[in-house]
Amino acid sequence: MEQERELVIRAKEGDQKAFEALVLAHERLVYNLALHMTRHPEDARDVAQEAFFVAFKRISTFKMESSFSTWLYRLASNVCIDFLRREKRRKSSHVSMEEKNGRILDLPDTNQSPQERMENRELLCAVEQGMRKLSQDHREILVLREIGGLSYEEIGAVLQLEPGTVKSRLARARLHLREILIREGNFPDRAASKKTGKEEPV
């Protein structure tokens, strides 16, 4: 831990070799986080690379109030979230189909009715608005669990929390999001309960 602190201090001062040592120490866990969230090895490699690039640019702003790993994994999870949002928008609006001549056409997804697509968009918008009103801790843990699909143990490793703390914080985050959605009328009580109030198995 003391060795990592020394590396961080040197990296903050512009020492590239120190930053490379930090990358080597954390690249496996960052990649695993990206893989859990993107579900695709190539996407995970790209996201992990982007996360380290962003970390390199921002390390001078790291105040060392938390561990470097916590700071890095939070940054990496945000990069993953941005990637997933881009992918979700792309996939929800179009389905690629190949013509006989090899050209690719972008056609509307016919698996859903217009009403279903509209309802899904409204649901996604309501949840995203509610998520923005959560505390950072609650928003972060919901993203890691609900979008990233990480286990309690994996979330604990990312956030440096005990599994029991992860479970209780996750339960509070779901409850708070549910209350926000119901209070603002974005969601009927029954749907909010179904989406945010039910605890799935580990």
Image: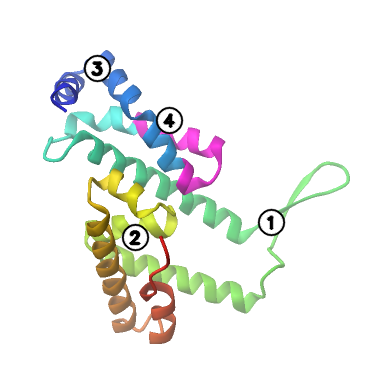
Q: Position of residue 110 (x, y in %)?
A: 72, 67
Q: Which residue is mark 4?
A: 49
Please report whichever mark, 3 or 4, sits nearer to the chain's N-terminal start.
3
User: SS of the residue at dot 4?
Assistant: helix
Farthest residue, direction right? 100
Residue mark closest to the camera, 2 vs 1: 2
| Residue 163, above or below 3 | below
- Hey, what amino acid is under mark 3? Ala
> How far is mark 4 from mark 2, CA to CA?
24 Å
Q: Position of residue 121 (x, y in %)?
A: 51, 70
> How far is mark 1 from mark 3, CA to CA?
45 Å
Q: Position of residue 138 (x, y in %)?
A: 26, 61
Q: Which residue is mark 3?
A: 18
> How far is mark 4 from mark 1, CA to CA?
28 Å
Quick check: marks 4 and 2 in contact, CB under 8 Å?
Answer: no
Residue mark closest to the camera, 4 vs 1: 4
Please report whichever mark, 2 or 1, sits nearer to the chain's N-terminal start.
1
| Residue 176, above or below 82 | below
Location of the C terminus by quadrant is bottom left
For residue 61, which quarter of the picture? top left
Location of the N terminus by quadrant is top left
| Left or right, 40 with reference to 132 | right
Q: Position of residue 177 (x, y in %)?
A: 30, 72
User: SS of the residue at dot 3?
Assistant: helix
Q: Which residue is mark 1?
A: 95
Tell me which segment is drawn in magenta.
35-53
- Hey, what amino acid is under mark 1? Val
